[in-house]
Image: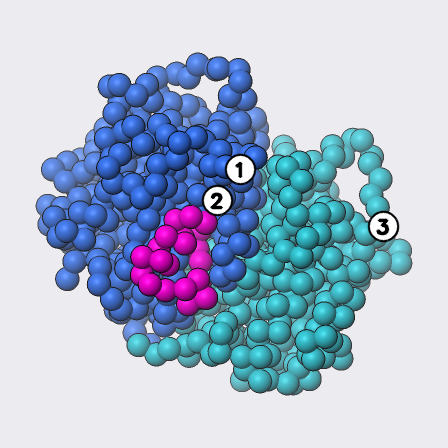
Chain colours: A blue, B cyan
Amino acid sequence: MIKKRIGQRTIKLNNLPTIIAASSVVGPKEGEGPLKDKFDLILTDDLYGEKTWELAESKMVKTVMEMNVKKAHKKLSDINLLYGGDLINQIFPSSFAARDLAIPFFGLYGACSTMSESLCLGSMAIDGGYADYVLTGASSHYCTAERQFRFPLELGNQKPMTAQWTVTGAGGLLLAKEGNGPKVKYIVPGKVIDKGIDDANNMGAAMAPAAADTIYSYFNDTKDDPNSFDLIATGDLGKIGKQILLDILKEMKVNISKVYTDCGLEIFDLENQDVHCGGSGCGCSATVFCAYIYEKLMKKEFNKVMLVSTGALLSPTSSLQNQTIPSVAHAVVIVNE
Amino acid sequence: MIKKRIGQRTIKLNNLPTIIAASSVVGPKEGEGPLKDKFDLILTDDLYGEKTWELAESKMVKTVMEMNVKKAHKKLSDINLLYGGDLINQIFPSSFAARDLAIPFFGLYGACSTMSESLCLGSMAIDGGYADYVLTGASSHYCTAERQFRFPLELGNQKPMTAQWTVTGAGGLLLAKEGNGPKVKYIVPGKVIDKGIDDANNMGAAMAPAAADTIYSYFNDTKDDPNSFDLIATGDLGKIGKQILLDILKEMKVNISKVYTDCGLEIFDLENQDVHCGGSGCGCSATVFCAYIYEKLMKKEFNKVMLVSTGALLSPTSSLQNQTIPSVAHAVVIVNE
């Protein structure tokens, strides 16, 4: 057995899984943002022909997975495993999509870290020889998330300026043991970190320490140079969380500022789209990666990227019980080599 | 790279992970059941010294994981990965336990299939060389589940006789790449199956087809003989679901009746404990496996066991939207060899 861990946390893969397809579907608002030309499908309304928002979100998941299989000229029955999740109680959208796709399914809950969580686990499944083809992905929907975590949309509630806007979107990847495309080289599983933030309208501040912990672990374990990356993308710390992350990492003597962005700042135009601190939700880093970042990797404009999806592991119940917000961030390093 | 798949679904591990420790904590009612002498800890009240049931459930998870580490003479910092989940929205209990344990954490949602889901993923992490020590587990709590899925306890609502009783309990396993103990040899990831059952008070009927699909896949892939097993344990189909499973498998020409039990029937005395069709909840198969079945494996009274935790992937929202109940079952074959 080959030991694949480096240092305390980082896992180096041996048989690098190739991302042979990536697909994204977003809602109308996301389709008016800066990445509008990158998505596979922009919905004209939030219901996507379904009777409820949850069923619409489920259909978005199904759509991106079917798109991936089609792009790779495969059949759904060729896929060995599906890893995915979302924000909704009992991951209703993902579970129902998995039923319709009829692929063996490992359901995940990592809040907005789900895209990189699924990519970590899916990559291990390919690298370890457990599967030839794996689908991974995540989704969120503004309307399903708002009514579950905050207030009925009909109330028209105002949000503080520290809040973020949940992305309506699903992103999915198809991993294979061989093929053309960028490859997953390193995985850094995240620890759950809680620095005592209890404001559910300031999740960037709650999640930044978890992102810092994971990013620091990678550089500490590998001694890699941050500037060897074309991009390090967290998702979704937003405007405030981004600055906190840079501040924490500066104290840890890790400087990623030249190559760093946050997916929550990429998907919306913060000046003109009234989204306060930026995008959030599992679908944020999922769609930004599957649309914008994947395209750059395919065009060789990026050759080394770290995706660090970040999740705030609060629930309405934990908030009612006056608990703070534990957070987690899983990192994946993707390369052209 | 060694290909580890056999047939359509089954994965055969090469470097069999050893279960070097198992621990369980249960509530007072479970502590009066037939397995009362098997659990590590029986709580004297449902709150376990905490202010809320969710925090009590979280403490139960933390307790079993700490017990495992202690039994194996390890430290928490020796553990590379933690896989776990529960039934509660945003897996509040597991996420908070993961924070306190400070082990890199992959959060799962598989409803009552979580014990075998975590064991599948944790076993791959050891077998693939990604980790030396992995903790896996699952929990449920009667009081947290009732108020989330059904009615406030204070209502004293009556349940139909097809309903099951959610177990208050947490079970956890410590896997290692070497050591003394039974070993995980085969994994069968579950497909999400939905035969159109929409009665949330008859989840055994909803889950039985998923269990049948997974069990059939194993025997079809491996051509193994059901009677070579000392025990095949589903969890938690209950009294009705158990019979449905046997009926479906009979039609598929797979006869497991001589070696079959359901964890929901083991944990309670159905005649005298007023639990209707038996136990349910992630904690049901988790505690039955970690207490009773693990002990039998350690004593070599069992040498080949299949654990098939079963999960109903409904949510209160999906039920309100008149949806049926998709279900999933993951299987793990554990051997002494």
Towards the viewer: A175 or A320: A175
**Residue numbers of the magenta segment:** A62-88
Pointers 1 and 2 in contact (C-beta within 8 Å): yes
Quadrant of residue B244 in the image? bottom right
Q: Relative to A249, is B128 above or below?
A: below
Marks 2 and 3 share the same chain: no
| Mark 2 residue element | helix
| Image side of residue A325 versus residue B191, left or right | left
Residue at screen point 65% across, 50% down: B325
Q: CA distance from mark 3 to mark 1?
A: 35 Å
Q: Is residue B329 above or below residue A286?
A: below
The residue that label 3 is drawn on is B161
Amino acid type, callout 1: Glu
Nearest to viewer (mark 2 / mark 3): 2
Q: Are marks 3 and 1 on the same chain?
A: no
Tag nearer the camera, 3 or 1:
1
